[in-house]
Amino acid sequence: MKNGYLSQWAQNVSPSPTLAVDAKAKALKAAGEDVCGFGAGEPDFDTPSFLKDACAEALAEGKTKYAPAAGLPDLRAGLAEQYAANGVLAEATPSQVVVSPGGKYSCYLAILATCGPGDEVIIPAPYWVSYPEMVKLAGASSKIVFAGDDQGFKVTPDQIEEALSPSTRMLILNSPSNPTGCLYQRQEMEAIVELACKHDFLIMSDEIYEYLLYDGADHHRPASFGPEAADRVITVSGFSKTFSMTGWRLGTLVANPTIAKAVADLQSQTTSNATTFAQYGALAAIRNWDRAIGAVHEMLVHFDRRRLKLLEGLESIDGVTCQRAQGAFYLFPNISSFGLSSEEFSSRLLDDLKVAVVSGHAFGAEGYVRLSYATSDEIIEKGLSRFAEFCSKI
Ligand SMILES: *Cc1c(COP(=O)(O)O)cnc(C)c1O
């Protein structure tokens, strides 16, 4: 059988390296090894119980059937109101909101609905591992623009302008970022949106970490910078990271009416609706927003303490430097001084000292590794001392 009859798409797609590291660490742990896992791409807290209760209630009430493909009308209306309040929508128009089975799928549909063969998508690196693969699956091509720690992992308007071509269709932004935790300031974001308007390209703004912020930092939504910005920015988010609901699979997307309808149509022919009773859990968050955000603030107290502990620990290791990330739950230290590739560094760290981190290579950033602090203080302390021991022996 030639290629096992695999399509061109299936032959070219790579499996998610972050999920792979996590799986390897979990397998080692299951085999009795004392692993310090910094690979996780999800919060380690339980979902707030009142959201679980709302979902269980919906299940008990028999809300177990198909829902409209683009989401429960009440949930879309609630989200639309929220997006109108924070300036992403000019008015609360539920038809511009699509609820999907996960922020990841929202990203994929945003790309699939707007990019195809012949189109170029500018992806700032370090990038979330799935973006280039999604662009490939849409038949479009990626143009990677690198921003290292010397520029706070943020691309400049000049860099974007240099990467533009007549085929540029979209720029992907992810602030706060996975893997770096970096956050674009308002002026930085405004300058990029201005470029999008001037050169007529779309922005997909992945805001999945919008509520996980530290040091009093603010999150800026590019779609809220005026009507033209709202027209060309596709805002993607979801419930996974904010409310520790990764397994629920609930993402959101807001776009202009034409794109939102195309996304809803694509979804109606591929997955249909996100799980009906799960959406009732999300609806409880939207309807009891203060309570829901209160639960997030409790998680943030722990995240912030761990962030500072991990940051301080990494910075105290000779040869390691680390940016003070202000969002998400990752740090992205520079380990290039040790003369090992990121792949070698991370695989030896796991093999020799049982510390799981993700190689920067996976994010298009050689010379760095990603550590998630969505783990206990105890693991952070133990992992840091092993990390330091490893570095001192290279
Ligand atoms: C986790 C993540 C997502 C989507 O998560 P879902 O679980 O699919 O909602 C999207 N973008 C980034 C950058 C992420 O880290």
Image (cartoon, grey):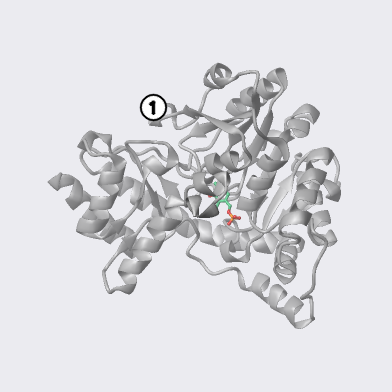
Instruction: List x then y, in percent, for residue 239.
Output: 64, 58
Residue that appears at 27% across and 74% down: 32
Instruction: List x then y, in percent, for residue 271.
Output: 71, 59
Quick one: quadrant of the C terminus? top left
Residue that appears at 59% across and 36% down: 173
Q: Quadrant of residue 136?
A: top right
In the picture provided, is 116 more to the left or to the right than 231? left
Instruction: List x then y, in percent, for residue 304.
Output: 45, 53
In the picture provided, is 273 more to the left or to the right than 389? right
Q: How many marks?
A: 1
Q: Which residue type does callout 1 highlight?
A: Asp
In the picture provided, is 72 more to the left or to the right than 350? right
Residue that appears at 72% across and 22% down: 200
Q: Is residue 391 above or below residue 49?
A: above
Does any portion of residue 273 appear in the rendered image? Answer: yes
Task: Tell me the crowding category of disc 1: few under 14, some 14 to 19, or many 20 or more residues within 10 angstroms, Cα based.
Answer: few
The residue that disc 1 covers is 150
Residue that appears at 34% across and 51% down: 310
Label 1 element class: helix
Q: Is residue 373 above or below residue 220?
A: below
Does any portion of residue 174 appear in the rendered image? Answer: no
